[in-house]
Image: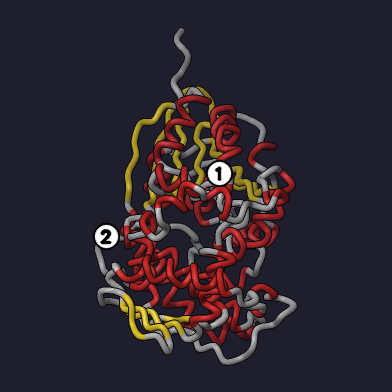
Amino acid sequence: MTTVAHDAPADAARWPDVVAVPRPSRPRDTVTAALVRRALRGLPLRVRLAGSGDLGLGGPVLQVHDPAAFHARIGTGGLVGFGESYMAGEWDAPDLVAALTVLAAHAADLIPAPLQRLRGLWAPRHPHEERNTPDGSRANISRHYDLSNDLFALFLDDTLSYSSAVFRGFPADWDLLAAAQHRKIDRLLDLADVGAGTRLLEIGTGWGELALRAAARGARVTSLTLSAEQRSLALERVRAAGLEDRVSVELCDYREATGQYDAVVSVEMIEAVGAEFWPVYFRTLDARLAPGGRVALQAITMPHARMLASRDTFTWIHKYVFPGGLIPSTEAIEHTARDHTALRLARRDAFGAHYAETLRLWRERFTERADEVAALGFDETFRRLWTFYLAYSEAGFRSGYLDVQQYLFTKENPAR
């Protein structure tokens, strides 16, 4: 992978915590440097610390150009500081995904067990204003999905699908991505038994491809989104397809949905709900689904123990990419549905390797079109942020730290 050069200074007004390196502190920085060395020396990495030699057992290279700033950021911000250090150009990697994959595979061991147990004392906490209340959710969703439709169009395929595709084989090819996205959508629609006359509720519109594909089957679709930008483009696409009579796209929180539907589909939406509101989300699915109906979900998941350990921690992803988000575990999803609804799990299929390939294609496309991203007004620091986000996510799936599932839940007709 070609990494993004970092020559221009960051805009201090836009990126204050990237520009401002924490003040040196000998006790803090000495302890941090020791902890970093302890964490890295046993990993299959080659970490090159400028002026200090190499660490690690060998493998993908991670080059730390400014060790003092690198340690100061980690010492004050933990993994948030690690990401900000990359945004600031203080470290880099010739193969960023490979280096991050090693770190993701050893995530549970990077912090010593005694410090893990004291996580609540040192780890940053979620800002109260980013709780996923109805108002908080609107603000959180807008910060990511309302960045620019043109930005997303630069690295997504023509379907504008922003979730894992399902490929026939690997390695995946860009020219096959749109077909792989349709394969993913069709699998979900088949799970939900969507066909002519189906009353379908979609929670999380994206840019409308699933709604269009369902309507082409003859379904009547009500699709909900909190992103004004996404809704605008989705409506344009619905009109262009001549499907206004079958698709309604509403700027509406899932908690405000009304009516009864034969099927509910929601693709990678639960990650934005937040653990506090998972019961509400599943109760909404249950309430909106008619007896005998089917729910098809696609969800990113992580190991349950890691979810429990990190669920209250404010991360780099929260700060810069997905405020208010939390990736659930399969146990959390299934237990919440069981304990709070009449929905019953009928099927679950995992396909994490497909997400790794989807992210690789997006990342490569984003890198190839960096000049076009810049032309849209996104500066160099943003481009490094986005490169890190896509690589970080891909590494999560390549390491097995993350997975993605398609779920089928059913709701039985009441006994007569």
Closest to the observer, 77 or 180: 77
In the rendered image, the vertical position of residue 413 relative to residue 374, given as above or below:
above
Closest to the observer, 175 or 327: 327
Q: Which residue is mark 1?
A: 202
The part of the image, by quadrant, that contains residue 23 is bottom right
Coordinates of residue 4 in the picture (x, y in percent): 49, 85
Which residue does the image show at 58% across and 36% down from the upper left?
Answer: 281
Coordinates of residue 313 in the picture (x, y in percent): 56, 52
Q: Is residue 119 left or right of residue 10?
A: left
Which residue does the image show at 54% across and 33% down from the upper left?
Answer: 282
In the rendered image, the vertical position of residue 107 relative to residue 89, given as above or below:
above
Is residue 365 in view from this perspective? yes
Which residue does the image show at 53% across and 83% down from the upper left?
Answer: 89
Badge 1 density bin: few <14, some 14–19, many ≥20, Cα 10 Å: many
Q: Which residue is mark 2?
A: 168
In the rendered image, the vertical position of residue 71 relative to residue 252, given as above or below:
below
Closest to the observer, 8 or 184: 8
